[in-house]
Image (tube, rainbow, N blue to C red):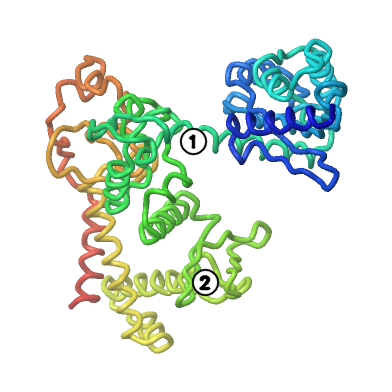
Amino acid sequence: MDSECAELQRAEMEALMAIYTSESFAFSTNENNIISGSIDAEVDADVCRQFIDAAHSNQSAGSMDWRRVKYLPPIRLDFTLPAAYPMAAAPQVSLSCCWLGDRALDAVMQGVLDIWSAEQGMCVLNSYIDHLRHDLQPSSILQISLGDDSGAAEGHMRSIVAYGNAKHKQYFESRAYTCLICMEEQTGRHCMELSCTHVFCRQCLSDYLRVLVTDGNILQMICPHLDCRKLDEPTIIGDSELDELLTNEQLTRIRGLREQRLLELNPMNYAKCPRTGCGKMVECDRKIERLCICQCGFTFCRICLRAWHGTNPCFSTASNEILEQYKRALVTEDKWGDSTDRKDLEARYGAKRLKQLLRQGIEELMSLDLIRSTTMCCPKCQMAIKKSYGCNHMQCSRCSTHFCYLCGSRIDQTEPMSHFNSRNSRCSQKLFDGIEATDNDTSAAQEAEQDEANLFIRLAFG
């Protein structure tokens, strides 16, 4: 009988090798000719979905968002075949699975043993695997459970997500898709599926992102499909996808643009290290105002970007105070002929240095006046935008906000013309109008300010 059993076992191993890949099935024979091995039973997709749906509302399945999971890792069946198997002895089996608890595995094992009871005397390993793949049903006992140990549960979660991603990638690459940009059919290996399920070929998606990176439009790195771009919160192309599609140089530029945006939005909390050769983004100290400590070891002030000076005033602040004193002294001399204050300041700080400060201040004010008079600020991110041509319906290149160039108010991106068509709007019927001219009448105070500005310009540049 032993020889007959050995022949049946050999035939069963050959059949299993023809059914399962080397990654999911392996066996070995010891010196006593006892066969042992393992088979990974990949649970059917419909069965997976039943367990995942049950886990979504089951707190015992952990805090994981099960809606993102499409596949569950296989159930491993370890077996040892006694010499009398299959004619007189059952195979010795054990089960292991990262998403089933001990009670659930015991219930599954009972179902496996029931198969032997019904098919005793026959080779049953493949029947066991079929049962694990297709016949499991969630119940009060048989349900997903990651265990009470938080550390182990977190490890199980990572395993489930990693397996699901690999399985989905394998399925995706085996099919053909039509790129939604070039409309050519490509295999999944040459395509990419975004989280919104829109599929594009990698070449088109890479070219699309390259243009955005070149233009600095990092906020526009969203799904290029029109349906997504219409949404208030369109699908963002993630970092993992960018890593696959862009070069190291392009990724470096994206990081720099993100840091610059972070600095613009949070100037009180972040600063760039001014040390030559560093330039890293530094988060300011939460307890000591203006203190920034870079990883390179340089400690500096967030305001003046110079070496940390403690409670002493910043160089830029001191310069502003000196400039204001000098301007007052110039006005006093011009009106009353008293040059004492001006000469005292020039003797203390140097006439050349004071005129340089005055020149810089005037240039900054002129730049600000030009920006204010020729641009409109985005109502969301406050970036100054200048219209070169076209209508007054604007879209910010930084944050994508739609707004009116005449009044600066936000407008509905789905119905932008309603702002210009409504009779209740102050911009009604002004889609292509220019900004209305302001009153040119100047008051005495404005004339005095202009005379003072002319004085400073004459002294600084004359």
Q: Earlier in the sequence, mark 1 or mark 2?
A: 1
Image spot of residue 33 (x, y percent): 81, 41
Along the line of sight, the residue nearer the viewer: 200 or 416: 200
The residue pinned by badge 1 equals 170
Question: In terms of image quadrants, where is residue 247?
Answer: bottom left
Residue type at mark 1: give it: Gln
Q: Closer to the observer: label 1 or label 2?
A: 1
Image spot of residue 394 (x, y percent): 24, 35
Along the line of sight, the residue nearer the viewer: 71 or 426: 71
**What secondary structure is found at the residue carrying circle 1?**
helix
Along the line of sight, the residue nearer the viewer: 269 or 60: 60
The residue pinned by badge 2 equals 314
Question: In terms of image quadrants, where is residue 367?
Answer: bottom left
In which quadrant is the C terminus drawn? Answer: bottom left
Residue at 38 percent across and 35 percent down: it is 188
The correct choice, above or below, for 208 with respect to 346 in the image is: above
Q: Distance between the residues labelled 1 and 2?
A: 59 Å
